[in-house]
């Protein structure tokens, strides 16, 4: 407006006819310049506050007025990049670099970031660098990925429970394949004072167009009318779909053996720790729960990864485990407390269906669980005769459905034998525990969770 004011002031000081063409053109140019500056500045504000959709609208409004406005083109490329439209973002940056290779705007860094995100969209992540950045506190943006082997949100039919929505394998999947990787829709770091529900509510106020993304997620309770800011519904959605973030730390072989011998790790290949963070990941929340899951989730910062932990046949449902390995009774109590609905959530995996229908086996599993979790080492065991009775009772059960009870029995027996310096026999128990655990959860890490005990026992 200052330019237009100067023109008007000059006109008042030196009156000229109002129909003077140059004067009218000057006012038009001044108005256009002011409009471009206002829209460009607002787009930059939207970018800083992560309102990507609004930034796109303002940048495109500027480009209608001035098609090659470099700042708006750069901001548009950044906003499109954040929204996952890497093709258009890269095209804009390539054009800018071609037009002005030595201009005032340095697009090389933006170009390299788009190339990195393009690789990540293909499932190629530099996880070592991601972990290093997270440890140093750098908040780096990463692209989302869903494997073509995964059919998301499809209807699944099971005779015993009817139809429901889940994820299926489009083809045979090998152990260790990356199924999905996503940046959290909303994320709370350990040192933040905010809560996840407040973050999501604030986000939906800023970006109401995202309301459908959140409201389409499953939750309990009667919400036939999906209001964009129904706070109770959002809390129920968080309860059913959020994850506590965990970080996987990998060690080299020398560190593994040292840490294992000192009893510092839960596994020789990696250590999974709860980072104290919590987040909502849209894609990953679409994987249903199973106590004998074929995939596992871990995270680096606010980015979650889901990998297969065993081979998965085409047409098989892809599942992750929402809770740590625990007894059927403990799982029922945990899921029963979910959401504001009195019914909570009932797991319908094969293991829970079996134990729900067989109270004897469920009681035995709970007995083993309580002994295994006993804080008093002397009471952390099952008598030999009872040990054999439980194993015989579970002998007809498929290995993947009894992995928890068998692994816990063998671990307790192995620990007791190692205290008696019967290390050779104890090693056999630990190996059987590892094999049982692997049968239920799969994956090299699943097998390794208990194998550190073998290494520890062998160094005594």
Image (cartoon, helix red, strand yellow):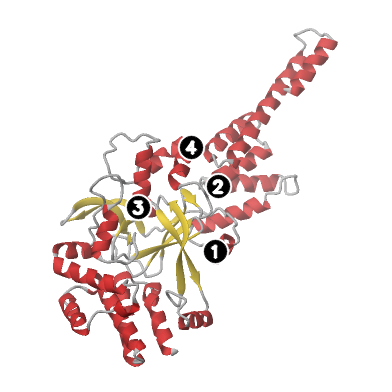
Tell me where residue 452 appears, x and y as whole percent.
Answer: 42, 80
Tell me where residue 75 appears, x and y as whole percent.
Answer: 62, 41
* In the image, farthest residue toward the right: 14
Q: Which residue is mark 4?
A: 207
Q: Residue at x 35, y 52 (%)?
A: 286
4 or 3: tag closer to the N-terminus: 4
Tell us which disc is closer to us: 3 or 1: 1
Tell us which disc is closer to us: 4 or 2: 4
CA distance for labels 4 and 3: 22 Å
CA distance for labels 1 and 4: 29 Å
> Tag 3's secondary structure?
helix
CA distance for labels 4 and 2: 17 Å
Pick the front one: 308 or 118 = 308
> Tag 4's secondary structure?
loop
Pick the front one: 32 or 338 = 338
Q: Are marks 1 and 4 in contact (CB under 8 Å)?
A: no
Q: Are marks 3 and 2 in contact (CB under 8 Å)?
A: no
Which corner quadrant of the image does residue 427 belong to? bottom left
1 or 4: tag closer to the N-terminus: 1
Q: Which residue is mark 1?
A: 131
């Amino acid at each position: 407006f200052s330019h237009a004011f100067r023109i008007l002031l000059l006109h008042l000081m030196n009156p000229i006819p109002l129909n003077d063409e140059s004067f009218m053109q000057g006012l038009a140019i001044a108005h256009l310049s002011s409009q471009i500056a206002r829209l460009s500045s607002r787009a930059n504000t939207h970018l800083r506050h992560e309102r990507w959709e609004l930034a796109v609208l303002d940048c495109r409004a500027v480009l209608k007025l001035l098609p090659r406005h470099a700042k708006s083109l750069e901001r548009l490329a950044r906003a499109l990049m954040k929204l996952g439209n890497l093709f258009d973002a890269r095209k804009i940056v390539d054009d800018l670099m071609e037009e002005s290779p030595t201009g005032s705007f340095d697009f090389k860094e933006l170009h390299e970031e788009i190339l990195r995100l393009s690789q990540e969209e293909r499932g190629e992540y530099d996880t070592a660098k991601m972990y290093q950045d997270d440890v140093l506190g750098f908040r780096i943006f990463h692209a989302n990925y869903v494997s073509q082997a995964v059919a998301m949100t499809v209807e699944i039919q099971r005779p015993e429970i009817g139809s429901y929505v889940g994820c299926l394998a489009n083809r045979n999947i090998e152990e260790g394949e990356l199924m999905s990787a996503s940046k959290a829709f909303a994320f709370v770091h350990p040192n933040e004072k905010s809560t996840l529900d407040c973050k999501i509510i604030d986000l939906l106020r800023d970006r109401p167009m995202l309301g459908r993304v959140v409201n389409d997620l499953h939750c309990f309770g009667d919400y036939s009318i999906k209001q964009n800011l129904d706070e109770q519904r959002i809390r129920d959605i968080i309860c059913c779909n959020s994850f506590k973030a965990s970080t996987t730390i990998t060690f080299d072989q020398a560190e593994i053996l040292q840490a294992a011998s000192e009893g510092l790790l839960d596994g020789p290949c990696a250590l999974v720790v709860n980072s104290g963070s919590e987040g909502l990941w849209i894609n990953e929340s679409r994987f249903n729960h199973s106590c004998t899951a074929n995939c596992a989730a871990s995270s680096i910062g606010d980015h979650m990864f889901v990998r297969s932990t065993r081979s998965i046949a085409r047409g098989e449902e892809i599942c992750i485990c929402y809770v740590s390995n625990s007894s059927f009774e403990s799982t029922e109590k945990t899921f029963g407390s979910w959401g504001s609905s009195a019914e909570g959530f009932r797991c319908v995996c094969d293991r829970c269906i079996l134990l729900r229908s067989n109270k004897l086996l469920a009681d035995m599993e709970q007995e083993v669980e309580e002994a295994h979790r006993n804080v008093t080492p002397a009471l952390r065991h099952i008598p030999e005769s009872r040990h054999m009775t439980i194993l015989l009772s579970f002998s007809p059960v498929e290995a993947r459905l009894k992995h928890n009870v068998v692994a816990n029995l063998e671990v307790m027996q192995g620990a007791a034998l190692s205290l008696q310096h019967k290390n050779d026999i104890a090693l056999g128990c630990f190996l059987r525990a590892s094999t049982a655990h692997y049968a239920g959860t799969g994956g090299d890490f699943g097998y390794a969770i208990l194998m550190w005990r073998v290494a520890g026992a062998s160094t005594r």
